Image (spheres, rainbow, N blue to C red):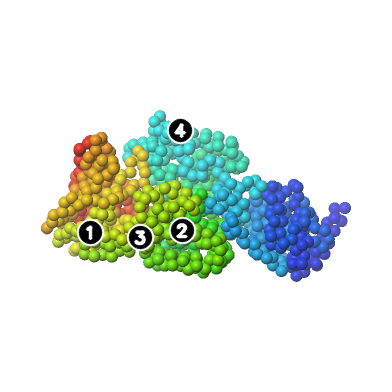
Amino acid sequence: MRTLLLLLASLLILVSTAHSADGWLQEESYDGVCVAVSQAASPSERYAASEFKKYWRMCTGHEPGDGPAPAGGSTVWIGREGVPAALLRQLDLDGLGPDGLHIKSVGTDLLIVGGQQRGTMYGVYEFFQRYMGVRWLAPDYTHVPSAPPSLPRLDFRYVPVFEWRTISYRAFLQNPWFAAVHRLNGQHPQIGEEMGGHIAYANGFGHTFHSFVSPDEYGESHPEYFSLVDGKRLVKQKGTQLCLTNPDVLDIVVEKTRGILRESMPARKIVSVTQMDTGFWCECADCKAIDDREDSHAGSVLWFVNRVAEAIEDEFPGAYIDTFAYTYTRKPPKHLRPRDNVIVRLCSIECDFSHPLADRQNRYNRAFQKDIKRWSKITKNLYIWDYTQNWYSHQQPQPNFHVLQPNVKFFADHGVKGLFEQSSPTSPHSDFEYLKGYILGRAVWDPEVDWRELFDEFIALYYREAGPYIHEYIKLITSKVLADEYYLAFNSKLEWMDYDTVVKADAIFQKAFAVAQDDVLRERLRSVYLPVQYAALVCIPNIELTDDAYILSRPPSQTFDEYWAMITDMGVTMLEDQPIKELRERLGGKTPPRYQRVTIEKIENEFYEVWVLPELNGSVVRFLDKRTGIDLFRGEEAILNSRWRWQDWEVMDPDDPEVEEGIEGVYDVVERAGGLLTVERALDNGLTVRRSMRLDPGVDALEVAFTITNQGERPVRPLIKPHPEFWLQGPYTPQIWIERDGVWQRQGLNYVGPSETGADRIEPEGMSRCAFHVPRKRLTLTIDFCPDQLDSVFYYFNLPNEQVNLELVPDLSPLAPGASRTVTATYSISRKSPGRL
């Protein structure tokens, strides 16, 4: 009997094939399609059947029937349950996993079968995308063309490259169905079981150290659980990581991890054990020994995470412990290897997003190439945290369209298994959120997809008659960044979009609005025009230099109040990670001036020339050695880029760290005589900052006196320092030297992230001079000072920014009312290395 049934099924296949010799199905047969799905199918497969019927109806105008088709019709089999065995044998189902799929026509029948969790459902979407031309462009717009006159014989099998795929654009987060049609299955879209569910973390998604061992809970009772830095345990939330070699810390994390997994398995099987976003790594003898041996701060982190993973693997054999390779832990360890149940999430935060990550000519990305190659060799489970939007302002133009898919392919080529594309998750109208989401959604599913085709397709379908102007605008801003060779960081501050570019961009959009034929298109244009309006408001100015001033001019724009009313009316709630009110605070609620004259105060002698801008935060923008022509600051560039200049800055409080910022506002000129200039700024906390700079005739040094006075009625801790950001004259690694007890000593550089940045704090006791030296330029800056006046000497260098800071940090103890504190120093430039001075 079984043999007879198989023979009859084979005959049916042969008959069906004969009736469709020219393809699978002709247009005149579209009304004879029926959809068959078993009651034993998975929830997502039953949902997939309803989706097939919906989109078939939308494409062809015909309502499919239910169950196997009668004679002369065509059956679309959804899922493997209930499919005749002879048909099922036509498919290659081995190795599909939960998300793989196989679409195949057999005679007049069509089989869409895949992994039962999501693969079959993905097969339905693949069919309509690949063969019917359906395009899911935005949550409010799906492009459904008329069905083709015929459908060919089909045979398409695919297993996704990435096992874990997530994009945090709000379009996906707020619309789980939209995430499902783009075949996302990772952390962020909360996709229900009827659509196959998603692979979510069992605890927080990142920066979780303190969720296990909190400074609030243990800081006072067990300070030894937290980072030892400069001989002191840091126990405040924002200032510390964990002491990863402390056995009690390991015990606490292991026990809490077990508790998390007992409550979450099997649905959520990944636990994040990841460093905090800010804070200092532990320098205790045991942690330091591991880091030194591994030549990376990833050493102590991976050592710790491996032990957590080992402790839970017997009880939870399907679980994973996830950790970061991020900033100071991005460099792979020399000897340690992640266990098989460890996920390493490598973060691309330092990269240049104007160039593909695979571009070996780009110096910013070469270090990342080195790191990912090494991690991919030692890690079984390599995931990526990548960046797609601007994280200084989501409304800011970020012309990275051309690198989105190439970067995804770069990750695939290096064996990456999971990919998170971090985007703007909640607030609307981030820069081209739907276009970028469309390219990324398609690319994380198929890294080989042609991004240019997707780009052109989206613009033509979504922006219709205004499409040519969108092309023109994107070409304008992309060409500007590339022509300027600008380092497009994940949080760039719009230093590249100048007056002329804004004016051109605005003119393009005016033409786009002029051709828009309905309100729907005008609203779409309004959303992507918002970044141009933002740029007009805050962009870098044109600069004209006169004998005694810089003349700054900005393009026409809305006032701040007009812009604020517009974005709040449009529903914008977030600037980046911070609420939109952060923009008001940044600009002080004021419109940046369209025209501004900034007076230059100059002092000079036969050796040096110094320019100070009292109205621009008291900045020093020129320190020129007349003998060599070397300028340690950069004049106009210093104004435009907010670096390569001297400002007074807040000092990070190690007990409660925040991002350090410059002191902003107008400095008063309180003394001007010959080669002496003194400027002063009164602060809101009662402190007054005074900086005197002197160039006397015949003296080969700039003399500086930095004074803080407490004009208030209570003691104040004076967290303020001189903050000169010197120009390295190129991307050259500096040498840091100190003179202690009359002997010059070259310091080993302390790298704090990938190999292009470094920083350290040096105790001033016994010192009298410090210096940085750039051998490639035969440049040395020497600073003479009194160590008794200092808390520390601090250096920082950033090669992508071509910058080195050498800072004299004053005594930071509280300053009594009426009291003052002064740091005096002399700065001199030489061609000699410090050892020859």
Identify whether 136 is placed above or below 576.
Answer: below
The CA span between labels 4 and 3 is 52 Å
Q: Which mark is residue 530?
A: 2
Residue 129, x across and y down, in percent? 64, 61
CA gap, disc 1 and disc 2: 35 Å
Marks 1 and 4, how far apart in space? 59 Å
Residue 49 place in picture, x, y as percent: 71, 53
How packed mark 2 is, by other alpha carbons closer than 10 Å (few <14, some 14-19, many 20 or more), is: many
Residue carrying label 1:
600
Callout 1 touching callout 2 (CB < 8 Å): no
Provide the residue designation for mark 3. 540
What is the residue that sits farthest to the left in this orientation? 698
Disc 1 marks a residue whose amino acid type is Ile
Secondary element type, mark 3: loop
Query: Spatial distance from mark 3 to mark 1, Cα to Cα?
Result: 19 Å
- Residue ID for mark 4: 248
Whichever of callouts 1 and 4 sits on the residue coming sooner in the sequence is: 4
> Secondary structure beneath disc 1?
loop
The disc, 4 or 3, on the residue closer to the chain's N-terminal end is 4
Q: CA distance from mark 2 to mark 3?
A: 17 Å
Q: Toward which corner of the image does residue 8 lie, by quadrant?
A: bottom right
Of badges 1 and 4, the one in the foreground is 1
- Amino acid, disc 3: Ile
Answer above or below: position of 270 versus 149.
above
Q: Residues within 10 Å of mark 1 (few under 14, many from 20)?
A: many
Asked if the residue at tag 4 contacts the one at tag 1, i.e. Cβ–Cβ closer than 8 Å, the answer is no
Quick one: label 4, few (<14), some, or many (20+) residues within 10 Å? some
Disc nearest the viewer among 2 and 3 = 2
Q: Residue at x 23, y 58 (%)?
A: 599
* Residue found at x 26% / y 58%: 598
Residue toward you, 766 or 437: 437
Q: Secondary structure at mark 4?
A: helix
